[in-house]
Amino acid sequence: MAFTIDFDPENPDLTSDTDTQNEIFIQVFNSGDGELFNRLYLDDSISNFSGEPLTGAARLAFFKEFLVSKPSLKARVTHSYIAGDVALIGVDYSIETTGPDGAPLLLEGNCTDVLRRQDDGRWLMAIDRPVAATGLVAE
Amino acid sequence: MSQLTDNLEKRTELYVDAFNSGDFDAVDSFYTEEAVAVWEPGKPLTGQARRDYQREFLARKPKMTAVPRQSFVTGDTALLIVDWVIETVDEAGVAERLTGVGVDVLRLGEDSVWRYAVDDPFGQD
């Protein structure tokens, strides 16, 4: 797995820097490796990508299924607020993927992400909440 | 988990009561020390700047109603989505009605009290 950004897959850290967070998130998402992407989250972190709030094994299973076809993510940060050991980030995203019928599908919207700094200093995803403008991520 | 969510919704009610009382110190107690509030879109404020802005805003005796739309709780962190309406007056004293969808991050303190870490009233278009 080649990343063009400083990133340790064994010990992921989204850092406190918003642009670095976004770039790591994009590159790991676009790697197609659901297991690796899942490591950006804590076990009890909540992902709403599927349309349902998922944690733990259910979230991992969804990420693996969703990313296996290597959908392509672009994301632009719209705002970022850091309050001590927690951060709220907003991004506009677009994802090029394939629909159930095999036809190209474009998913667009904006997403709210909550990040938490861990006791060891690493920043990881706590909650994501996409609001889809076009299509639904789960379909 | 549901207990925490219940506490969170109750917290919103208490926050609205404090807001509508116009008592800034009561409202301020709902925020963490490092809290960021974005009561004016694009202008995040923290610390004394946040307090000064909120104190002035509350001096006009605005009245808020808020309806929680969604909440996500993981450990000591929560994301709350709230539909709100505020009736206030503008700088010229003319009645003004503000509405928005708030996107708020709350933290559970060691005293088991939820406090706003990020208060973004216009967080969702």
Image (cartoon, coloured by chain):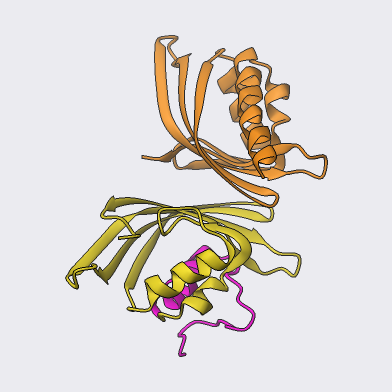
Nearest to the observer: residue B29 or residue A100: A100
Where is the C terminus of chain B found, in terms of image quarters? top left
Residue B45 screen position, x and y as percent: 58, 40
A78 horizontally vs A57: left or right: left
A7 horizontally vs B84: left or right: right
B22 horizontally vs A76: left or right: right
- In this view, the residue farthest toward the bottom is A1
> What are the residue bounds of the magenta stretch?
A1-30
User: Who's the residue at 52% across and 19% down the image?
Assistant: B64
Nearest to the observer: residue A127 or residue B87: A127
Image hue for chain A: yellow
Q: How many marks?
A: 0
Residue A29 sits inside the magenta stretch: yes
Q: Which chain is orange?
A: B
Where is the N terminus of chain B found, in terms of image quarters? top right
A105 horizontally vs B14: left or right: left
User: Who's the residue at 50% across and 53% down the image?
Assistant: A53
Q: Determine whether A138 is above or below B49 in the image.
A: below
Nearest to the observer: residue A106 or residue A3: A106
Q: Determine whether A93 is above or below A132 in the image.
A: below
User: Who's the residue at 47% across and 20% down the image?
Assistant: B86
Q: Is residue B5 visible?
A: yes
Residue A127 screen position, x and y as percent: 55, 55
Residue B6 screen position, x and y as percent: 65, 33
User: Who's the residue at 39% across and 74% down the image?
Assistant: A67
Task: Identify the image quadrant of residue A121.
Answer: bottom right
Q: Determine whether A12 is above or below A125 in the image.
A: below
Task: Identify the image quadrant of residue B114.
Answer: top right
Residue B98 sits inside the magenta stretch: no
Nearest to the observer: residue B53 or residue A1: A1
Residue B90 screen position, x and y as percent: 44, 16
